[in-house]
Amino acid sequence: MEGFQDNQHEDWGLHPHLEQATPTPVPSALLPTVLQRLGLEGQSTLSFEQAREDIRNPDWQKRAAAVRTLGKLNTPEAQSLLLPALDDEDSSVRAAALHALGQNASSERLFTALHDEDWHVRETAIFIVGQHKQKRLPDALALGLRDTDVLVREAAQMLQNRQQTLQPLEQPPTNHRIDLFAPPSPHSHISGQQMSMQPQERHQPHRSTSLFSPFMQKKDRKLMRQEQEQSFGQEPEQPSEYRSYDPYRNGLSERWEKATSYPSYRRPFRSRWYMLLGMVIVFVIAGIIGWAVAVITPFSRTNRIIQVQGEQATALPFYKSTVVPQKSDTLYTYLGHSGYVYAVAWSPNGSRIASASADGTVQVWDATTGATMGANIVVHRGNLSSYSALAWSPDGKYIASSSATDPTVEIWNAATGATTATYQLQGAAASVSHIGAALRLSGGCGTGVYQVAWSPDGTRLALAGGYQTHGIVEVLNALTGNILLTYTAHASCVDALSWSHDGKYIVTGSFDGTVNVWDAATGKTLYQYATTGTNDIVESAAWSPDDQRIALSMQGQSIGIWDPFNNQKSQFTTGPDVFQIAWSPDGQRLAAVGPTGDARIWNASTGANLAAYNSNAPELFAVAWSPDGRMLAAGGMNDAVQIWQV
Amino acid sequence: MTLSDRELPILLATDLDRYFKLLVLHYQQRLYTFMFRQTGSLQDAEDIVQEAFIRAYYALADYPGERIQSLKLQAWLFKITLNIFYKRVNHDRLHLVSLDSSDESMYLAIEDDEREQPEQVAENRESLRELEAMVATLSPQYREAVNLYYFEEMGYREIAELLNQPLGTVKSNVHRGTQLLRKTLGVQKSR
């Protein structure tokens, strides 16, 4: 183990205000040209004849304008002219044509559009499906919620929220059939596939991707494999009105069922009775097996989910097991999210785990996963489109959650998901440390709360983040939201925050390369550590359980151990970058995650790498020890939280 | 007229044709400057930003009002603009200058202690322009990351969501792009 270099801070950031120093004047013709091209300066609208001509014009904008005109006409002739536009080479034209056809778009076309290479076309398809009176909404939602693009996910989330106010879902018509033998669009990711399926026996009408599609995304294949594993001993199909509460369930389970069933175009009435009888038998057998498994293993259960709307919470049956046994040291994987998992934390008594995700939810679930029946899952849907930080109150009753792209912090009841208070980071009112800014120029922060932490006595709340280019930390009265102090000693975004267990100190780390220990009551900086030249960004900081040391992770591929009171420093190289670091409760080990997708355990004294747990996620963003130090939870880019026995 | 980022979506949802002009006025400077840094060409920047606004109009015209009100317009416009930029790059309609590997290795061969502090350089307006020109010589992925991070002042996660890239990739590109700029500065100063 080598010592930290005592160093003069050497920052190589670039000046953030270069743009203001050298604005490039916008050509005066830009605005008039845009308005003129859009016909917003009094030009007459296109005639049908002109639109019919323009729809074959080489200029994409002419074609888009023609599509809009034809869409407004809503005549059979106009519609027939619109159909070829769905295969237009230009994505704006394809999206406009889809919108113009609206509910007249066929299922095949919608299916193709939901897999278009362009995010805007997929987003439009989501909205069109939403106009179909929810006939095919759940399946499209499942696709949209897992889309790689944040805008498509937001659109799906919006529809899902709207759908929840329209329960129960309308059943699809029994004579509706989707035939996907039609030639695929050249713009589709699913081209080359031939599938035929009939939706009338299912709530969700079609499988969105094929197991055998060479174009299917790797993530989809993986999820499908996981579903195959889950489907063993699968529990009975839940009533349709419960489906929307579980984004993962929507679409994926029928994917597996479709993949393992023969296509059927029409089923006689009698066969339904046989099917019902079969289902009853399966229920009974599954119930017996489920009971036996629950007794034998502590990691199987029948979950219950609590759906929260406003201040009311309703307990609902939740049939899909979120537990996937994997390998010997993997206890289970929680799959309730449909977006990256940015934060994970165990409740103070270790009975529950909370996970914050880019899917716009924070979910609380039973950490022991079914050791007792009736365990709950709470889904908090606040007003943030994505959650990236969370913290349990010391009494385990409340959770504070926030987003790195929004100044809002929500405080909510961990048992019901109901929001009890909302606070805003008041970055605009804060003055920036100009000395710091002069010495340490850095890049953007956005405006958001990167980290949140409760004081150990639960009376105060610390918010750390950025306001444009400023790094800022605010300490609030947790009950009233009144700002008790504002800490602005960091010149750039504050990405690391930890409150000492005795409540006296706060350590913060910043993109400006500094780590400061300061008095939590006065805001006075007491100790400072500055990284070396290449280690510009402090990713994570955490007090040791005895409050004597601070573990730091830095972009420069190293973990540092800093004793600020005795000015002792040590570091060891970790290899890849480390996004988050966490002390084991005994203070002997450190868990670290980063862009390799595995969680590594390090000896905090020697720097020896003790173990690595692979998650199958490309990157892991969050890691947390259970309070007893026997388990590790990590979340990341596979939309999952994996639990290992350490 | 000064509009907040929250007011404009509401107006656009109310009457797109009437208020679209405000959207252009509000964001044209930022998009144009950003695109100029990306392309290094005033004409290309103008063409791309024009097209971006037109595509934005068509998209907004098809969105439900609820969707328009929920949009983070700035990030959304950047996304549209970058899509057009990359489409043009892929169709060879833009001729970007980029550092080839030999240039890069030359820069990286310079020792750290030979470099100049960028903030010292930044005190000089002429040097600022040099720095801006240097950004335009970075390869596209570094240029984009440096542009968004330093000039547009976006956070890592914001950039990751905008570009649909892993967080680690964004951090790495910003870090690598910054390193290349330092080396470039070092080389120029040592000459």
Image (spheres, coloured by chain):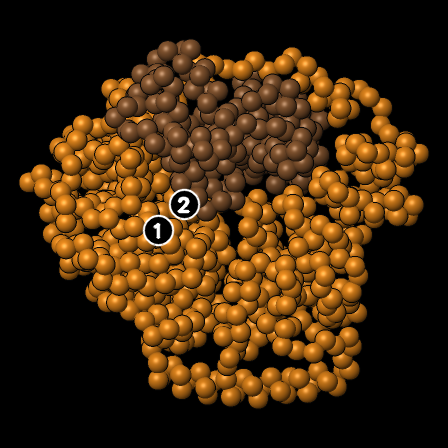
Chain colours: A orange, B brown
Verify CB contact (< 8 Å) between mark 2 and mark 1: yes
Pick whichever, A617 or B124, lies toward us: B124
Instruction: Give, as a three-letter code, the residue at label 1.
Output: Gly
Instruction: Give, as a three-letter code, the residue at label 2.
Output: Gly
Residue visible at 67% across and 30% down in the picture? B93
Q: Is residue A162 left or right of residue A38?
A: left
| Secondary structure type for disc 2 | helix
Q: Is residue A350 left or right of residue A570?
A: right
Mark 2–mark 1 Cα distance, whole angstroms, equals: 8 Å
Pick whichever, A337 or A4, lies toward us: A4
Q: Position of residue A10 (x, y in %)?
A: 24, 27
Q: Position of residue B41 (x, y in %)?
A: 59, 21
Chain letter behind tag 2 = B
| Secondary structure type for disc 1 | loop
Which residue is denoted by mark 1 in the rendering? A594
Q: Which mark is residue B168?
A: 2
A52 is higher (above) or lower (below) than A365:
above
For the C terminus of chain A, give its image quadrant.
bottom left
